[in-house]
Amino acid sequence: MSVARNLLLTGGIVHPFETAAAALAGVLRGHGIESVVTMDIEGGLAELPRGGFDLLTIFSLRWTTWAWSSPTIRSCAALETSP
């Protein structure tokens, strides 16, 4: 049986993403899917064109509706990627 490789992009505000992403990777492992977990969204996306992944999972939260009213939260929660 071949093992599928998954890139799991995670991170954000409010939730314990690092812990939860590890648990999600464990569940996927039980189904024959090995995950590379990263909290570096842009760096992870840069890996995709190089190949090596069969799947992409995005488990992230970058903002909530109320976050945009707070400049402090907005500055740490917003995500801008390179063109």
Image: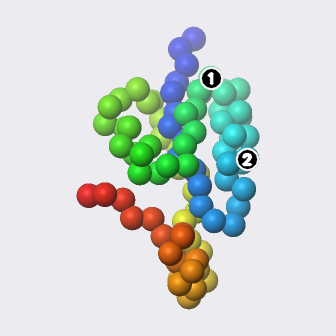
Residue at x-position 58% and y-position 32%: 35
Identify which residue, 72 or 55, lies in the foreground: 72
Task: Kindly state the secondary structure of the residue where label 1 is placed.
Answer: loop
- Residue at left offset 59%, top offset 27%: 33
- Evaluate whether residue 56 shows in this view: yes
Left or right: residue 8 versus residue 19 is left
Q: Is residue 45 above or below residue 32?
A: below
- Residue 39's x, y, as percent? 55, 49
Please provide percent x and percent y for residue 82. 31, 57
Q: Residue at x 37, y 38 (%)?
A: 48
Residue found at the very far bottom of the displayed protein? 69
Label at residue 19: 2
CA neighbours of label 1 inside 10 A, class few (<14), some (14 to 19), many (20+): some
* Viewer-closest of 6 and 38: 38
Q: Quadrant of the C terminus?
A: bottom left
Residue at image point 36% right, 59% down = 81
Mark 2 / mark 1, whichever is N-terminal: 2
**43 left or right, relative to 57:** left
Amino acid type for the residue under numbered disc 1: Gly
Mark pair 2, 1: CA separation: 20 Å
Residue 42, compared with residue 74, is above or below; it is: above
Which quarter of the figure is the N terminus placed in? top right
The kind of secondary structure element at disc 2 is helix
Q: Which residue is mark 1?
A: 32
Amino acid type, callout 2: Thr
Quarter residue 14 falls in? bottom right
| Neighbourhood count class around disc 2 (C-alpha, 10 Å): few under 14, some 14–19, many 20 upward | few
